[in-house]
Amino acid sequence: MEKREELYHGKAKSVYTTDDADRLVLLFRNDTSAFDGKRIEQLDRKGMVNNKFNAFIMQKLEAAGIPTQFDKLLADNEVLVKKLAMIPVECVVRNYAAGSLVRRLGVEEGIQLNPPTFELFLKNDALGDPFINESHVQAFGWATLEQLAQMKAYSFKVNEVLGKLFDDAGLMLVDFKLEFGVFHGQIVLGDEFSPDGCRLWDKETRKKLDKDRFRQGLGDVIEGYEEVARRIGVPL
Ligand code: ADP
Ligand code: UDP
């Protein structure tokens, strides 16, 4: 299946139609953005690494019973996916405090959260992806109560499956963001799971191996992503 017209040019990926009305191609670019798109740089190999990383993770999740968009890898930077009607809400699960939670609540980075937390953000760059709650999602019709319950259950299931996968590779899954959509009436995991949208620390040293290396100017950003990929067995 080949890509046809560009439907959408996102911050990190481009979305293309295909000859199948139910399928899209996601093209992972090297563009790397932070602070709601206010800072953008090109990082060599990022598109390829994230595409292959995402394909590997989505297949693990599918095997664990979580419905995903993944269909097949088409090229180093391209994947064929189910075309979802995206729900404009980001689901964030946290196992340790970091990022906006630390800024919002003034807690110390790295404290363990037991039980893990579940948060919702509206996907809206112009507003800086504001923090929202379940009643906003319902009141504005972004998703139904049933869809939200399914998204939450899948988010915690992803945490269980990937928490173990990364732990076995000597890594802490600090937090992550998921986006879901609807495909033939069912909630399906879309977008991507890669070090761009999660936090991963080395268990021993707590070295950051995710997008915080870019946000915080720590250097060796893609080298961090590649180290994670190598440790969990992603074929690059
Ligand atoms: P952003 O929109 O934040 O700039 P990207 O550059 O990653 O993000 O763009 C990818 C876009 O494609 C996002 O808007 C995302 O919601 C959307 N998307 C991801 N997966 C799918 C899918 N399977 N079906 C339809 N749209 C998708
Ligand atoms: N995240 C993301 N896209 C966003 C916002 C957050 O992928 O638009 C991810 C981020 O990489 C982290 C998790 O969601 O793994 C929680 O992010 P947080 O709320 O701490 O925000 P940040 O500190 O990134 O602004």
Image (cartoon, rainbow, N blue to C red):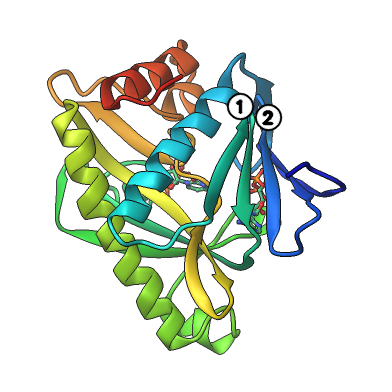
In terms of sequence position, does the residue under pointer 1 or pointer 2 come before the other? 2
Spot the residue most to the front: 1
Q: Nearer the viewer, residue 15 or 33?
A: 15
- Residue 224 pos. (x, y %): 39, 17
Element under disc 2? loop
Mark identifier at residue 47: 1
Mark identifier at residue 164: none
- Residue 67 pos. (x, y %): 42, 63
- Residue 201 pos. (x, y %): 26, 28
Q: Is residue 210 above or below residue 191?
A: above
Q: Nearer the viewer, residue 83 or 153?
A: 83
In the rendered image, is residue 95 in sight? Answer: no
Mark identifier at residue 29: 2
What amino acid does circle 2 point to?
Arg
Give the left or right position of residue 203, taking residue 46 as reference.
left
Q: Quadrant of residue 74?
A: top right
What amino acid does circle 1 point to?
Gly
Give the left or right position of residue 123, taking residue 164 as reference.
right
Question: Is the C-beta of the residue carrying label 2 under 8 Å from the nearest atom of ligand 1?
Answer: yes
Q: CA distance from mark 1 to mark 2?
A: 5 Å
Question: Is the C-beta of the residue carrying label 1 under 8 Å from the nearest atom of ligand 1?
Answer: no
Q: Is residue 108 above or below residue 204?
A: below
Element under disc 1? helix
Name which residue lies at 33% across and 65% down: 154
- Residue 36 pos. (x, y %): 63, 44
Q: Are dots 1 and 2 in contact, CB under 8 Å?
A: yes
